[in-house]
Amino acid sequence: MQSEKEKSLKGELYKATDYELFTERQYTKKMIFSFNSLPPSDVDKRNEIIRKLFCKTGEKFMIEPPFHCDYGSNISIGSNFYSNFNLIILDCAKTVIGDNVLIGPNVGIYTASHPVHHELRMVEYEFAFPVNIGNNVWIGGNVVINPGLTIGDNSVIGSGSVVTKDIPANVVAAGNPCRVMREITEKDKIYYFRKFKVSY
């Protein structure tokens, strides 16, 4: 017989009020409380907490407090990850984030959802679908990413967007609902080099 946790990770209907899942969330809340309560200078201690909580972390990352998540154990982040203030990840399913990802303030990444029909909600059923964010992605402030979605490598999600469908690689996408505005090309690189007179 499957546990409620196994059901949740398979995208099946499950009950989050299950004792095992409740206990895991309580542990995570305790760890996150410690993370958010540390002095700003205690970067190493904050990172140590994240390494204990997350399924995987890259070599270098920075998560600005406050930060909140459900379990942490379903979150993987790559190297050179940065998130600004008030990132919320409802990680009832796997949340995989690649290398060199930048996340603005007040972003919500949600794997969790509930049935549309009220009778299923009344008996506490819910479900979760994984979220995948590729390498080199920039997510602007106040973005919401809904369950079961993928954002492709190198793409930019404009601030305030609500992502309801997969976003391909190498595009700028924005809006509510979020949609592709244009492709990212070499012209974008040249523009910034000329404007700011930089090279690499």
Image (cartoon, rainbow, N blue to C red):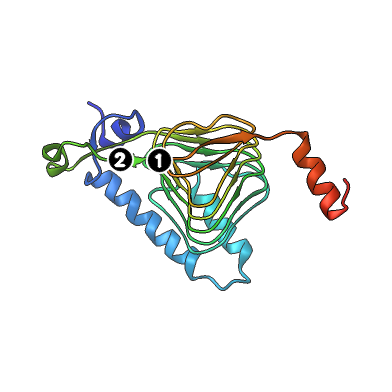
Residue 68 circle label: none
Q: In the rendered image of this protein, does residue 101 appear above or below residue 183?
A: below
Q: In the rendered image of this protein, does residue 85 appear above or below residue 1?
A: below
Label 1 Cα neighbours within 10 Å, binned few <14 / some 14-19 / many ≥20 = many
Image x and y of residue 200, in percent: 87, 45
Q: Report the label total.
A: 2
Query: Which amino acid, by three-letter code, is at mark 2?
Result: Ser
Q: In the rendered image of this protein, does residue 6 appear above or below residue 34?
A: above
Decide: marks 2, 1 in contact (CB < 8 A)? yes
Q: Residue furthest bottom?
A: 39
Label 2 Cα neighbours within 10 Å, binned few <14 / some 14-19 / many ≥20 = some
Badge 1 marks a residue whose secondary structure is loop
> For this rendering, which residue is in front, 43 or 181?
181
Does the rendering let one see residue 130?
yes
Using residue 61 as the reference point, say whether residue 144 is left or right of it.
Answer: left
Residue beneath label 1, please?
A: 146
**How far apart, in angstroms, are the residues tagged by discs 2 and 1?**
9 Å
Using residue 110 as the reference point, say whether residue 64 is left or right of it.
Answer: right
**Which of the two marks, 2 or 1, is nearer to us in this view?**
1
Residue drawn at (62%, 64%) of the image: 43
Residue drawn at (66%, 40%) of the image: 136
Residue drawn at (88%, 53%) of the image: 197
Residue 113 circle label: 2
Does the rendering let one see residue 134?
no
Image x and y of residue 7, in percent: 29, 31
Question: Earlier along the polypeptide chain: callout 2 or callout 1?
Answer: 2
> For this rendering, which residue is in front, 74 or 182?
182
Query: Which amino acid, by three-letter code, is at mark 1?
Result: Asn
Image x and y of residue 8, in percent: 31, 34
> To which quarter of the image does residue 177 belong?
top left
Badge 2 marks a residue whose secondary structure is strand
